[in-house]
Each structure stands twice: as structure tokens, then as C-alpha cells.
């Protein structure tokens, strides 16, 4: 399991590194993109996000079935949250770099 988990982590890290715009959007989601939208838009966005996370969790479960459905969903949800936080800190604004 450890070897499969390491391979999965490497695949996820490469996939995210190859998609900087996606990482930017993930990091801006709660603080920027979810502001000033209608409740209907917010509901649809959350439904879509959950559906996407479930689809990705299904792919993870194929490689790490030991995690189970709930475990893979939690893994994906945690990965998305950590990605947003780490990306924002790893790519500071020009002003923050100058400071």
C-alpha cells in the first residue's frame, strides 16, 4: 500500500504542478470566487464541487481500495483544501515578495 500511495501522491503533485491556473482558482475559491453570488449559484457550485470530488475519489479508490469510499473522499477533500492553502503561500504576490 505504501508504494501505491507514494505513486498516487507523485501523480497528484505532478498533475497540480502542471495546472497552475487550477491551483490559482482553488486558492481563490472561498476567499474570492464564492463572494457576491446568488444562493442558486452557490448551491450549484457546491453540488458541482462535490460531484467532481466524488469522481476523483473514485479514481483514487481504484488505486487504494483500502481507503474505502469515505476515506478516498476525505483524502480528495483534504488534498483540495491543502492545495489552496499551500499554493497561495508558495506563490506570493509581487507586493509580498517586495516586502
Image (tube, rainbow, N blue to C red):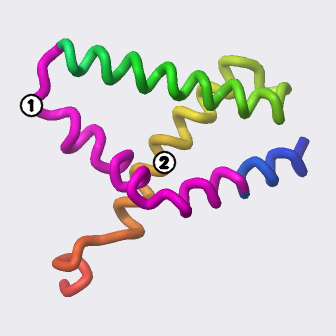
Seen in the picture, residue 1 relative to 3 is either above or below; the reply is: above
Q: Quadrant of residue 59?
A: top right
Q: Quadrant of the C terminus?
A: bottom left
**Left or right of 85, for residue 9:** right
Residue 67's x, y, as percent?
77, 27
Towards the viewer: 99 or 14: 14
Q: What separation in Å lies between label 1 and label 2 (alpha carbons)?
A: 24 Å
Looking at the rendering, the stretch of residues picked out in magenta corresponds to 11-39
Q: Position of residue 39 (x, y in %)?
A: 16, 15
Q: Quadrant of residue 21?
A: bottom left
Question: In the figure, is residue 59 to the left or right of 25?
Answer: right
Give the crowd class for mark 1: few <14, some 14-19, many >=20 residues within 10 Å.
few
Label 1 or label 2, whichever comes before in sequence order = 1
Other residues around mark 2 within 10 Å, as few (<14) / some (14–19) / many (≥20): some
Query: Could you tell me residue 15's position as x and y percent?
Result: 61, 54
Say which of marks 1 and 2 sits in front: 1
User: At numbered mark 2, what does the secondary structure look like: helix, strand or loop?
Assistant: helix
Say the numbered circle drawn on residue 81: none
Residue indicated by mark 2: 82
x and y percent of residue 88 in the render?
35, 60
Which residue is depicted at the point 54% across and 38% down? 78
Q: Name the residue: 48% across, 51% down.
A: 83
Q: According to the image, label 1 marks what residue? A: 36
Q: Residue at x 49, y 41 (%)?
A: 80
Task: Determine which quarter of the picture holds residue 61.
Answer: top right
Helix or strand or loop: what does disc 1 sit on? Answer: loop
Whether residue 89 appears in magenta in the rendering, the answer is no
Amino acid at each position: 500500500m505504501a508504494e501505491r500511495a507514494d505513486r498516487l501522491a507523485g501523480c497528484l503533485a505532478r498533475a497540480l504542478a502542471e495546472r497552475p491556473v487550477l491551483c490559482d482558482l482553488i486558492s481563490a475559491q472561498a476567499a474570492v470566487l464564492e463572494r457576491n453570488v446568488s444562493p442558486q449559484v452557490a448551491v450549484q457550485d457546491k453540488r458541482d464541487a462535490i460531484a467532481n470530488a466524488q469522481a476523483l475519489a473514485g479514481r483514487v479508490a481504484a488505486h487504494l481500495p483500502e481507503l474505502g469510499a469515505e476515506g478516498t473522499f476525505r483524502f480528495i477533500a483534504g488534498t483540495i483544501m491543502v492545495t489552496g492553502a499551500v499554493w497561495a503561500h508558495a506563490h506570493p504576490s509581487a507586493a509580498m515578495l517586495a516586502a
